[in-house]
Image (spheres, rainbow, N blue to C red):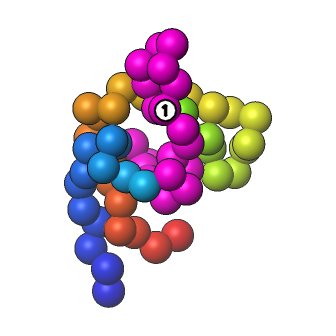
Amino acid sequence: METMQTKSLRDVKPGEYFKRKPDARAVFVRGAYDRSSKRIGATDFDDINRELFIKPDAIVFVGFTF
């Protein structure tokens, strides 16, 4: 059984899945760094039209099975 781990968003590799909260339903895919806003793009796994731009220092949760 895998355990959920915390990481800084900048340490998550592009294309890797993550959650913003440990009990969240939404799963995001890490995208590219946007230099103009100094944030990292994250696309919702279930709705590809929903994209967030999150600060690289944000703590996210990885290492889960969905």
Q: Is residue 2 visible?
A: yes
**Residue 35: percent from left, percent from top:** 48, 20
Rendered view: 54 above or below 13: above
Mark 1: few/some/many CA within 10 Å (<14, 14-19, 20+) = some
Residue positioned 51% across, 13% down in the render: 36
Q: Residue lying furthest top in this view?
A: 36
**Residue 37: percent from left, percent from top:** 48, 14
Rendered view: 31 above or below 34: below
Looking at this view, is 31 or 58 the one in front?
31
Q: Residue lying furthest bottom in this view?
A: 1
Q: Which residues are magenta?
A: 14-40
Element on which disc 1 rests: strand
Q: Is residue 23 visible?
A: no
Quick check: is 22 in the magenta stretch? yes
Residue positioned 37% across, 52% down in the render: 12
The number of numbered discs placed on residues in the rendered structure image is: 1
Quick check: is 39 in the magenta stretch? yes
Residue positioned 49% across, 59% down in the render: 16
**Residue 29: percent from left, percent from top:** 55, 50
Residue positioned 35% across, 60% down in the render: 62
Relative horizontal placement of residue 41, taking residue 3 as reference (left or right): right
Tell me the kind of residue under disc 1: Tyr
Check the picture and name the quadrant holding the N terminus.
bottom left
Q: Which residue is mark 1?
A: 33
Relative horizontal placement of residue 23, taking residue 43 as reference (left or right): left
**Residue 10: percent from left, percent from top:** 33, 42
Relative horizontal placement of residue 18, taking residue 44 as reference (left or right): left
